[in-house]
Image: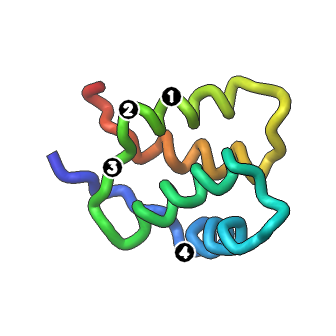
C-alpha cells in the first residue's frame, strides 16, 4: 500500500536546518533525515524509526522541535504494523 502522507514544506525546511546545524543532537538528525526522506515521496516510516520516534514522544528529555519531528515520522508510519 502506497503512503499518501508527506512531510510538509515547513517541517522539511526545519529538518534541513537541523541536519546542517552542528549543535543538533544525533536523535534530531536521525529524525530529520527520516522527515526529509518522506518529503515529496511515497516513502513510509520503517519499524525501527517508528520505535525511535515513539520513544522520543514518550520521554521528557526532548524539546518541542525534536518531538515535532518524531510526530511527523510517526504520522507517516504503516498503520497495519
Q: Answer with mark 4 or mark 1, whichever residue precedes in sequence.
A: 4
Q: What element carries label 4?
A: helix
| In this view, 63 is above or below 29 | above
> Disc 3 designates what residue?
44
Q: Is mark 2 on a helix, strand or loop?
A: helix
Is 57 or 4 nearer to us in this picture? Answer: 57
State how far apart marks 4 and 1 are (Cα).
Answer: 24 Å
- Disc assigned to residue 51: 1
> Disc 4 designates what residue?
9
**Image label count:** 4
Q: Answer with mark 2 or mark 4, whichever residue precedes in sequence.
A: 4
Q: Position of residue 77 (x, y in %)?
A: 38, 40
Q: Answer with mark 3 or mark 1, whichever residue precedes in sequence.
A: 3
Mark 3 surroundings within 10 Å by alpha-carbon count, few (fewer than 14), some (14 through 19), many (20 or more): many
Residue occupying image coordinates x 75% and y 26%: 59
| In this view, 58 is above or below 19 | above
Q: Position of residue 74 (x, y in %)?
A: 49, 40
Q: Is mark 3 on a helix, strand or loop?
A: loop
Q: Which of marks 4 and 3 is in front?
A: 3
Residue occupying image coordinates x 78% and y 58%: 24
> Disc 2 designates what residue?
47
- Disc assigned to residue 36: none
Determine whether label 1 and label 2 are within 8 Å by CB: yes
State how far apart marks 3 and 2 are (Cα).
Answer: 10 Å
Q: Position of residue 26 (x, y in %)?
A: 69, 49
Mark 4 surroundings within 10 Å by alpha-carbon count, few (fewer than 14), some (14 through 19), many (20 or more): few
Determine whether label 4 and label 3 are within 8 Å by CB: no
State how far apart marks 3 and 1 are (Cα).
Answer: 14 Å
Amino acid at each position: 500500500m502506497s503512503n499518501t502522507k508527506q512531510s510538509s514544506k515547513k517541517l522539511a525546511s526545519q529538518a534541513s536546518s537541523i541536519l546542517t546545524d552542528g549543535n543538533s543532537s544525533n536523535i534530531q538528525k536521525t529524525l530529520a533525515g527520516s522527515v526529509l526522506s518522506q518529503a515529496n515521496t511515497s516513502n513510509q516510516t520503517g519499524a525501527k524509526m517508528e520505535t525511535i520516534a515513539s520513544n522520543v514522544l514518550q520521554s521528557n528529555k526532548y524539546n518541542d522541535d525534536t518531538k515535532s519531528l518524531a510526530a511527523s515520522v510517526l504520522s507517516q508510519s504503516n498503520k497495519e504494523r
